Image: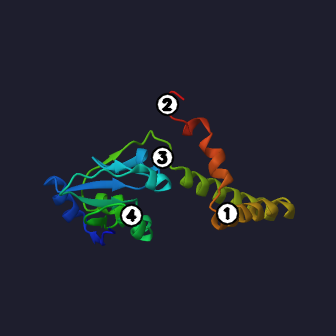
Amino acid sequence: MTAQIQTLNPAAVAERLRAGKAILVDIREPDEFARRHVKGALSRPLSAFEAAHLKIEAGRDVVFTCRSGMRTGANCDRLAAAVDGPAFILEGGVDGWAGAGFPVVEDRKAPMEIMRQVQLIAGLMVLAGVALGLAVHPGFFALSAAMGAGLATAGATGFCGMAKLLALAPWNRPTGA
C-alpha cells in the first residue's frame, strides 16, 4: 500500500519526535549526513534507498528529510512507497529545522560534501580559465569550456568523474581507511 505524503513544519515534526510518534529518516548521502544532521535521524541514502529496508515500529509516522526539502519533494512517490502508514516530509529539510531554532549535530571536521567540492573546484577552474584567457592567452578559455562540458555531461548522465576522483582524495576517506 502506498502512503500519502504530506509536508510538516519543523515545530510539528519536533513535537511528533518528542512524543515518540514519529521517526526521522534523512535521505542524503553519508558525506552530507556526517557533516550536519538532525539528532536522532536515521541515515538512509537515496542512492541505496530500496536496499535500506526501513523497519518502522507500528504506530509511528515516518518523516523524511534532506538538506532543503528539494530532494524529498522530488522523490515523494518513491519515499511514500517505502512505508505502509503515514509518511511526511520535513518542510525546509535540515536547513528549515535549524532555521526554526531546533538543534542539529554538526561536525565541522567532516569533509565538505563531495558535490560542494565539485561545485567549488569547477567554479574556480572556470574562473581561472576566463582570467587566464583574458590576461595570458586565449587558449586558456578551453579550460572553462572543458569544465562546462564536464558539468553538462554529469547532468545528462548522472555520472560525475570529478566527484569520483574527489571521493578518493585523502581528506574524503573515512578515518582508519
User: What SS does tag 3 mark?
Assistant: helix
Give, as a three-letter code, the residue at label 1: Leu
Asked if marks 4 and 1 touch (Cβ < 8 Å), the reply is no
Q: Residue furthest top?
A: 176
User: What SS does tag 1 mark?
Assistant: helix
Foreground: disc 4 or disc 2? 4
Which of pointers 1 and 2 lies earlier in the amino acid sequence?
A: 1
Left/right of residue 137 with respect to residue 74 in the rendered view: right
The residue that appears at 51% across and 50% down in the rendered structure is 113
Question: Whole-Å distance between the Cαs marked 3 and 4?
Answer: 20 Å
**Residue 79 disc label:** 4
Give, as a three-letter code, the residue at label 2: Thr
Q: Which residue is mark 1?
A: 151
Left/right of residue 118 with respect to residue 11 in the rendered view: right
Asked if marks 1 and 3 touch (Cβ < 8 Å), the reply is no
User: What SS does tag 4 mark?
Assistant: helix
* Quarter the C terminus occupies: top right
Give, as a three-letter code, the residue at label 4: Leu
Disc 4: CA contacts within 10 A as few (<14), some (14-19) or many (>=20): many
The residue that appears at 75% across and 60% down in the rendered structure is 129
Q: In this view of the protein, which residue sits in the foreground, 132 or 139? A: 139
**Residue 175 disc label:** 2
Q: Position of residue 131 (x, y in %)?
A: 74, 61
Q: Position of residue 13 (x, y in %)?
A: 22, 61
